[in-house]
């Protein structure tokens, strides 16, 4: 077991512009995972190696990696009593993009596990076919983020206006 490092206040801050680049998931059935990520969510397959595939939103080398190297035919990870990834988040640049994918999911009868307005963003929640949690969301412009009288961010969780969101879907 690794020791927990002691906190050093203000010693280092992640540089501005840093972002999280991609997720790589173990899946139990690559064809089924591709049907979900490619055919339903709309990601483009950049490389399919048979036991792994790499998908992109815009021609980037990959935003999502999928593999069956140690998981082919296995079981999804348990949700209770274990540490692990709670969910991965996919950011849509515009509300209309979130609306379009939400409409696709609902039209396909794909189950959503939640839909929330967080003040800073609107999000839908679902699990992929292997039980990996996903958040699909768009961020409101920073000028619209809720803040307290002293300027501190005041995020919240309210029900999402799903009809209002879906009204943007073409």
Image (cartoon, helix red, strand yellow):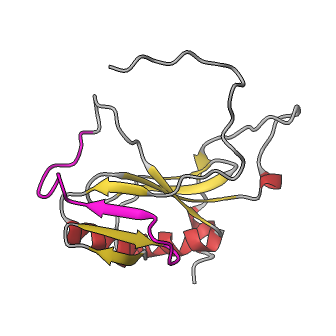
Viewer-nearest residue: 109 or 33:
33
Q: Position of residue 4 (x, y in %)?
A: 46, 18
The residue range painted magenta reads 57-78
Q: Left or right of 25: which side holds 30?
A: left
Residue at 16% from the left image edge and 49% from the top image edge: 75
Residue 99 vs 89, above or below: the answer is: below
Viewer-nearest residue: 155 or 73:
73
Q: Position of residue 170 (x, y in %)?
A: 57, 84
Viewer-nearest residue: 107 or 85:
85
Q: Left or right of 75: which side holds 108?
A: right
The verdict on residue 8 being magenta is no
Residue at 61% from the left image edge and 68% from the top image edge: 165
Q: Main secondary structure of the magenta part?
A: loop
The verdict on residue 77 being magenta is yes
Residue 97 vs 153, above or below: the answer is: below
Q: Position of residue 147 (x, y in %)?
A: 80, 40
């Amino acid at each position: 077991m690794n020791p927990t490092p002691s906190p050093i206040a203000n010693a280092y801050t992640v540089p501005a512009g840093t972002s999280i680049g991609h997720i790589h998931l173990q899946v139990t059935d690559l064809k089924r995972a591709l049907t979900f990520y490619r055919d339903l969510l709309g990601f483009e397959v950049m490389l399919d190696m048979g036991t792994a595939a790499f998908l992109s939103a815009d021609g980037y080398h990959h935003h999502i990696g999928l593999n069956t190297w140690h998981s082919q035919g296995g079981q999804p990870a348990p949700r209770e009593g274990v540490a692990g990834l709670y969910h991965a988040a996919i950011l849509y640049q515009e509300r209309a993009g979130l609306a379009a994918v939400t409409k696709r999911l609902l039209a396909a009868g794909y189950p959503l596990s939640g839909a929330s307005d967080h003040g800073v963003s609107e999000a839908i929640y679902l699990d992929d076919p292997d039980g990996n949690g996903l958040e699909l969301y768009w961020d409101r412009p920073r000028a619209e983020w809720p803040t307290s009288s002293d300027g501190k961010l005041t995020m919240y969780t309210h029900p999402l206006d799903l009809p209002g969101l879906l009204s943007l879907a073409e």
